[in-house]
Image (cartoon, rainbow, N blue to C red):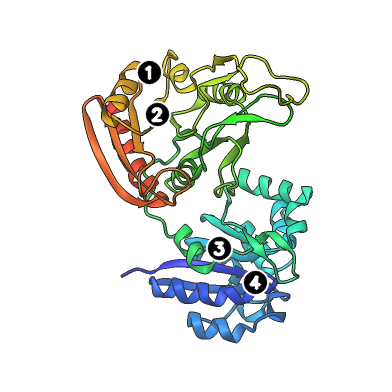
């Protein structure tokens, strides 16, 4: 069996100790791992640890007389099938972004021609710094994939984004199967909308956004370029997904219509309000009397509007139902001119709003599939696989 080659770069942060588990897990999955450490990384953990775990000498010097006789850094770059930097500090990311090559790791980044993954690890304030985000955006434009970071308590005591993603999740991210949605452009809506009554109150739908975010994350792993248009939710943006935040149904409609012309597919997973108040009061509405009447008007139907476009993308709707699920889903499929619709029960003992699990009944003009109860990440993968099959069938007909 030919082993896949992973070039693991370790820069100087406290999370460097987590890289030892990373090497162990990669070796467990039959990857051949060569480790490169910066001088700062060696202050946190010794090269001997990684030599023992990887079975190879650890590379630490750019100008190593023994290695450079054979252009060692070029040979390492050619050897690699995947370059992974974990942890990647703010300094390391800045070097990569600006093309600096003052040590072995930064030189290798410039020399490799394989896919590159970066797992950042830094203080939350450093992560949010504008210049750090600009460096990350520049690297993403150059094709680098970012894994994490995660939110939580940091070594310094701060709480927020900046923790390195756990080793098992990093391995999962770089060992994903061959993508079924390679180079497809997919727009996904997620979460609720909020329709304001006054400066204090709003009307909304119940939605955690978990299903839409799971779809966005899995679609990106399957090779798609994903735009996620999201209502207000408390969820982190999936890796390498472009997120556009909106609040009202009107804002979501405008964002969708602005970006839809370039898309291959649209998945409308958001719980968009069907009605919005006819008038938004400038001041807080005061309590008066025992009853109050609220005048409302229909919002624009986003998925139906997309489905009527002359060159519409492959369009998938969602339906959450409390009764007559098949009837309402089939009606929506036909009435809105959709290619597919994924329907789920709400108000049941398991699944639905805020749950980590769900089940879907998926309909299209020629067929039906039931996706049984599972966690939303796995469910998203199953649904996207089915969408890919139906998309290919339609476009090969």
Q: Is residue 257 above or below residue 80?
A: above
> Which percent across, then down, holds residue 21?
52, 76
Crowding near the residue tagged with mark 2, few <14, some 14–19, many ≥20 C-alpha atoms within 10 Å? many
Where on the picture, by quarter, is residue 244? top right
Distance between mark 4 and mark 3 Cα atoms? 14 Å
Which circle marks residue 15 in the picture?
4
Q: Are marks 2 and 1 in contact (CB under 8 Å)?
A: yes
Which circle marks residue 370 in the picture?
none
The mark that comes first in sequence, 3 or 1, is: 3
Q: Which residue is mark 3?
A: 84
Q: Is residue 315 left or right of residue 67?
A: left
Q: Is residue 357 above or below residue 200?
A: below
Residue at 51% over, 54% down: 115
Residue at 71% over, 63% down: 122
Where on the picture, by quarter, is residue 158? bottom right
Distance between mark 2 and mark 1 Cα atoms? 9 Å
The mark that comes first in sequence, 4 or 3, is: 4
Q: Which residue is mark 1?
A: 336
Distance between mark 3 and mark 1 Cα atoms? 45 Å
Q: Are marks 3 and 1 in contact (CB under 8 Å)?
A: no
Where on the picture, by quarter, is residue 277? top right
The mark that comes first in sequence, 2 or 1, is: 2
Q: Are marks 4 and 3 in contact (CB under 8 Å)?
A: no
Residue at 39% over, 26% down: 315
The mark that comes first in sequence, 4 or 2, is: 4
Q: Which residue is mark 2?
A: 317
Asked whether residue 390 appears in the rendered view, the answer is yes
Q: Secondary structure at mark 3?
A: strand
Distance between mark 2 and mark 3 Cα atoms? 37 Å
Mark closer to the observer (4, 1):
1
Depth check: give the residue in front, 307 or 270. Answer: 270
């Amino acid at each position: 069996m030919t082993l896949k080659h992973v070039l693991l770069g370790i820069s100087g942060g406290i999370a460097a100790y987590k890289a030892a588990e990373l090497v162990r897990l990669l070796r467990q999955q039959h990857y051949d791992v060569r480790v490169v450490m910066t001088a700062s990384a060696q202050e946190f953990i010794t090269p001997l640890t990684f030599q023992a775990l990887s079975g190879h000498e650890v590379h630490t010097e750019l100008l190593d007389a023994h290695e450079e006789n054979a252009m060692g850094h070029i040979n390492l770059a050619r050897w690699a099938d995947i370059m992974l930097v974990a942890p990647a500090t703010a300094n390391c990311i800045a070097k990569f972004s600006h093309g600096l090559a003052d040590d072995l790791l930064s030189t290798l980044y410039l020399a490799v021609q394989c896919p590159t993954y970066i797992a950042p690890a830094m203080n939350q304030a450093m992560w949010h710094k504008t210049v750090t985000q600009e460096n990350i955006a520049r690297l993403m434009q150059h094709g680098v994939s970012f894994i994490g970071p995660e939110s939580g308590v940091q070594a310094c005591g701060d709480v927020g984004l900046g923790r390195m993603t756990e080793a098992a999740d990093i391995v999962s991210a770089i060992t994903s199967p061959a993508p079924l949605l390679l180079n497809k452009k997919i727009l996904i809506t997620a979460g609720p909308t909020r329709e304001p009554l006054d400066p204090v109150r709003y009307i909304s739908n119940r939605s955690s956004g978990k299903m839409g975010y799971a779809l966005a994350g899995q679609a990106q792993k399957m090779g798609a370029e994903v735009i996620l248009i999201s209502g207000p939710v408390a969820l982190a943006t999936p890796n390498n997904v472009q997120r556009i935040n909106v609040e009202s149904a009107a804002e979501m409609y405008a964002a969708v219509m602005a970006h839809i012309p370039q898309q291959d597919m649209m998945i409308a997973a958001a719980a968009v309000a069907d009605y919005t108040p006819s008038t938004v009061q400038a001041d807080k509405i005061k309590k008066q009397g025992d009853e109050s009447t609220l005048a409302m008007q229909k919002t624009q139907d986003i998925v139906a509007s997309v489905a009527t476009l002359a060159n519409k993308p492959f369009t998938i709707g969602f339906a959450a139902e409390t009764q007559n699920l098949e009837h309402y889903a089939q009606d929506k499929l036909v009435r809105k001119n959709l290619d597919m619709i994924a329907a789920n029960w709400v108000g049941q003992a398991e699944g639905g709003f805020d749950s980590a699990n769900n089940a879907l009944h998926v309909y299209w003009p020629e067929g039906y599939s039931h996706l049984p109860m599972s966690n939303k990440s796995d469910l998203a993968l199953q649904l996207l696989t089915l969408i890919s099959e139906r998309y290919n069938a339609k476009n090969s007909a």
